[in-house]
Amino acid sequence: MVGVLLAVLLTIASCGAPRMGTDGRKPGQARRNTTWSPPKGPGGVGGLLVGARWAAQWITVGGQTTTAPPHAAAWVGFDHDGTATGSYGCPSFRRTTHITADTLTLGAPEPQPTTVGRCAAKNRAFEEGFRPIFTGQLKITRRVDDLTIALKNPRGDHLALKLLWPKDLFGRRRQVDHLAVADTPYPLAAGKAVYFVFHRDGTVTGNLGCNDFTSRATFSGDVFTLYRPAPTTHRTCSKDIMRDEHIMLSVKTDPRSTRFSATTDSWESDHDPTQGFPDFGYGFKALAH
């Protein structure tokens, strides 16, 4: 199976391998950078909200349920600085927040640009239910697990959320745990030496197993778009590590957009069938602080 996966991966690589040299660093050794440490937040279920982005799945008002628009058009992210930003499905919003282990208290919304006339009817309908719920003090409860949460008001209306971005997506070193090839994980020879760091300004830095690189990335709804990495060092390593690195440097489509899903501390970017086969995505796992 590994041989088949490798053959598939190599078909997407271009003919010329990136030019490499040598330096004094051990093969596969990742360059050290400043240790990332997460800001402290509340405990309990409320602590799950902070530092992550959540997609709205549905709202229930007076016993009537309305499903959210597709591709995470309605979402909310909770920052460590006591603010929440997001989209009702049409317009964006920004709110002050106070989060405890089991409650969310929201301040008044800040003025945002109007989107009337530029939004789908389904999105506008969801917004009409989202706005009245997302105000005042709300009870935070798990629905199924740490990936699904409900925000409930005193009347019993609630907003169902599902984790969209893992905790502290930006600034944290994330290992490329594997490449996802046709729904099958392909492990990388360099292991934890392969990592990406996503920055809020859209830049990406890291190491591909042997060489450091830079790139750009965007996140929109449930779509992750990555531009082809460009090496910033010129080292040589073992044959297996160089093979994997060449695969990641030689994708045909630039940039590549893929769907992604997250767990509490990891996320996977799956190949998009609409772009044609063969293609691959990434499996990211947060490294220890």
Image (spheres, grey):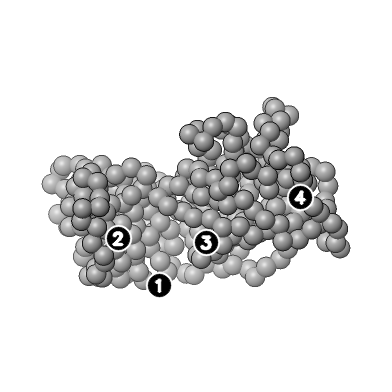
Q: Are marks 1 and 3 in contact (CB under 8 Å)?
A: no
Residue under pointer 2: 92
User: Above or below — where is 196 with respect to 98?
Assistant: above
Q: Which label number is shown at residue 132?
A: none
Label 1 vs label 4, nearer the camera? 4
Residue type at the position of mark 3 = Gly
Q: For the residue labelled by badge 1, is the local secondary structure a helix, a strand or a loop?
A: loop
Q: Indicate which disc, 4 or 3, sits on the residue closer to the N terminus.
A: 4
Q: CA distance from mark 4 to mark 3?
A: 24 Å
**Front disc: 1 or 3:** 3
* CA gap, disc 1 and disc 4: 42 Å
What's under tag 2, amino acid-wise? Ser
The first of marks 2 and 3 along the sequence is: 2
Instruction: Give the image location of residue 5, x and y in percent.
Output: 68, 31
Percent x, y for residue 237?
82, 51
Determine the CA span between mark 1 and mark 3. 20 Å
Q: Which percent across, then down, holds residue 9?
A: 67, 35
Please give the residue where the numbered disc 4 appears in the rendered image: 18
Q: CA distance from mark 2 to mark 3?
A: 20 Å
Disc 3, SS: loop
- Spatial separation of the CA atoms under disc 1 and disc 2: 18 Å
The amino acid at mark 1 is: Asp
Query: Along the horizontal axis of the image, is 27 left or right of 229?
Result: right
Numbered tag placed on residue 202 in the rendering: 3
Q: Which residue position holds label 1?
A: 81
Could you classify mark 1 by the number of other residues whose Cα lies within 10 Å: few (under 14), some (14-19), or many (20 or more)? few
Residue drawn at x 85%, y 61% is: 23
